[in-house]
Image (tube, helix red, strand yellow):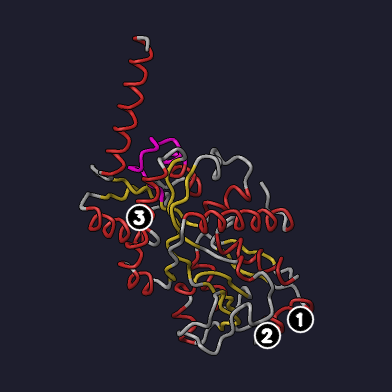
Amino acid sequence: MTRLATILLTLAISLLFSWNVSAQQFPSKRVTLVAPFSAGGADAIARAIAQALSDIWKQDVIVENRPGAGSQVGTLHVARSKPDGYTILISSSAFTTLPAVRSDVPYDIFKDFEPISLVAFADLVVAVGPNVKANSIGELIEEQKMRKMYFGTSGAGTSSHLLGEGLNLLTGMNLQAVHYKGGSEAVLDVAAGRTDAFVGAVNSLLPMIDSGKVRLLATIANERRAYSPDTPTLREAGVDGAENLSVWWGMFVPKGTPADIVDQINAAVTKAIDQVKNLLSKTHAVKAPMSRKDFEELLNRDYVFWKSVSEQRGLTE
């Protein structure tokens, strides 16, 4: 064996040994969980997961908020980070909806990231205000044929906007979007009868539901919910494809992160989700840990569905 061949073989063995040791010892230093949204709201889920992971790994796990451009700032930061498992993204379903709607997103969600696991689904509902006569989704479909009807959103391109347009696509309705600066304003105007409907997270609606100012026509879930057991699910209401209407939180690492480390993170995240199930329940989020393969399949279905909604409802930018 030549001197050069010996050196190369020694180097290869050294690198392989070094990688195996680093994978076995992961994590051996502080881990950063990047949240591409501001502190507050969904940030509580990120911080709870970080604390649970810290307890499991016996290492510091810190949350770094990097909001901006509808989550693009923080997401791009993770895409450009070293693929060693020490920088993890916790994102909402904007991860798939944003590139489905916009053509200028500066990263590729399939080429630049490795999915770790889904964390939870948000509890979603279809709610209507006092001016709506309908008592079911079927009756709402008929009522909107008789007059122009509107649904409130927390802003163009937000989850409540896309959910409303997704409902339009699945049911053949043509409810018109009215955009507000935030979800509370949209909900208040539904309760006041200035708009007709809201499609989104139930936690922002509960006070209005309890007071009778808004009514639920359907929950967007796999089964009926304890807070309104008489309200049918959207699937029970006869809407095919209702499972595509979802808002979720999930976790990712940069593409190229060693598979062994990604598997270790997935296993730890699965344990962490179980530890924070009480917090998730209080915030009306449904825990949903997944294998990497199942999560990847969900991401593909999600992107295809929202791309279709974007194109057919004229949302593409």
The amino acid sitting under disc 2 is: Ala
Answer with mark 2 or mark 3, whichever residue precedes in sequence.
Answer: 3
10 Å neighbourhood of mark 1: few (<14), some, or many (≥20)? few
Residue 242 to residue 4: above or below: below
Q: CA distance from mark 2 to mark 3?
A: 38 Å
Residue at x-position 34% and y-position 61%: 44
Is residue 95 shown left or right of residue 283? right
Disc nearer the start of the sequence (2/1): 2
Q: Which residues are magenta?
A: 76-89
Q: Is residue 295 left or right of residue 310?
A: left
Q: Callout 3: helix, strand or loop?
A: loop
**Amino acid at the residue labelled 3:** Ala
Which residue is depicted at the point 66% across and 64% down?
Answer: 166
Q: On the image, numbered disc 3 is attached to which residue?
A: 39
Q: Residue furthest front?
A: 1
Residue 231 placed where, x, y %?
56, 86
**Tags 2 and 1 touching, CB below 8 Å:** yes
Task: State how far apart marks 3 and 1 are (Cα).
Answer: 42 Å
Q: Amino acid at mark 1?
A: Glu
Within-10-Å neighbours for mark 2: few <14, some 14–19, many 20+: some
Q: As displayed, is residue 306 above or below residue 253?
A: below
Q: Which residue is mark 1?
A: 142
Q: Is residue 246 left or right of residue 238?
A: left
Residue 258, percent from left and from top? 40, 40
Residue 294 in the image: state x and y as whole percent: 52, 59
Label disc, if present, on residue 134 of the rendered structure: 2
Residue at image position (47%, 40%) is 255
SS type, badge 1? helix
- The residue drawn where x is 62% and y is 73% is 195
Number of labels in the image equals: 3
Instruction: Please name whichever residue, 216 or 186, is drawn nearer the observer in this view of the structure.
Output: 216
Q: Is residue 85 magenta?
A: yes
